Image (cartoon, rainbow, N blue to C red):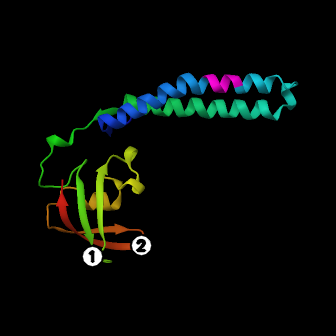
Amino acid sequence: MANFVYLTAERLREIEGEVKELKTNGRKQMANTIAEARSYGDLSENAEYDAAKDAQGLLELKISKMESLLSRAQIIDGSTFPEDEVHILSNVKVKNLNNSKIYDYLLVSPEEADLQQGKIALTSPVGKALMGKKLGELVEAQVPAGIIKFEILAID
């Protein structure tokens, strides 16, 4: 079996809801689409039917992947980690010493990462560099564009 996937309780509930939605309404809509395409006549020359069957396969693959993720999920609770160092679920305020900009990051599992929302994966170059560090420490992260230097300003 594959490795554990660490999720917050909130993200676990979101994925469970999405799987339920896909299994009920998603499958129902897919069946309707296939039935409509089938009504267009000869299945051997029916592009709509072929497209609908392909879409059905992708839907089932998505459901399968999400169920696999849920079967490997371990819930994490940030309140059990030390407060004075960066860990998963830490909110970290850093100053990029290369451009003097301040960034707020929440370190999360790769499955929850979303840079637009400031959620970075602890497995990302910046996430790896920050893990285990303490307030005031200087950190270097090797990224594709080179080395970024950070100062940790706050940890929540």
Depicted 43 relative to depicted 149: above or below: above
Task: Report if residue 106 lies within the magenta region.
Answer: no
Mark 2 crowd level (few <14, some 14–19, many ≥20, 10 Å Cα): few
Whether residue 5 sits left or right of residue 89 in the image: it is: right
Q: Earlier in the sequence, mark 1 or mark 2?
A: 1
Q: Which residues are magenta?
A: 28-32
Q: Nearer the viewer, residue 40 or 44?
A: 40
Task: Give the residue type at disc 1.
Answer: Leu
- Which corner quadrant of the image does residue 151 belong to? bottom left
* Residue bearing the label numbered 1: 97
Q: Is residue 104 visible?
A: yes
The residue tagged with tag 2: helix, strand or loop?
loop
Give the mark toward the camera: 1 or 2. Answer: 1
Q: Residue at x 58, y 29 (%)?
A: 60
Q: Is residue 1 visible?
A: no
Give x and y (percent) for residue 108.
31, 48
Which quarter of the image is occupied by the N terminus?
top left
Give x and y (percent) for residue 113.
38, 50
Q: Name the main secondary structure of what is drawn in magenta.
A: helix
Give x and y (percent) for residue 49.
77, 29
Task: Give the residue type at disc 2.
Answer: Ala
| Distance from the alpha carbon under mark 1 to that under mark 2 | 15 Å
Depicted 20 relative to depicted 103: above or below: above
Q: Residue at x 69, y 34 (%)?
A: 54
Q: Residue at x 58, y 27 (%)?
A: 26
The residue tagged with tag 1: helix, strand or loop?
loop
Q: Nearer the viewer, residue 64 or 99?
A: 99
Give x and y (percent) for residue 22.
54, 28
Q: Residue at x 33, y 46 (%)?
A: 109
* Residue bearing the label numbered 2: 145
Depicted 112 relative to depicted 103: above or below: above
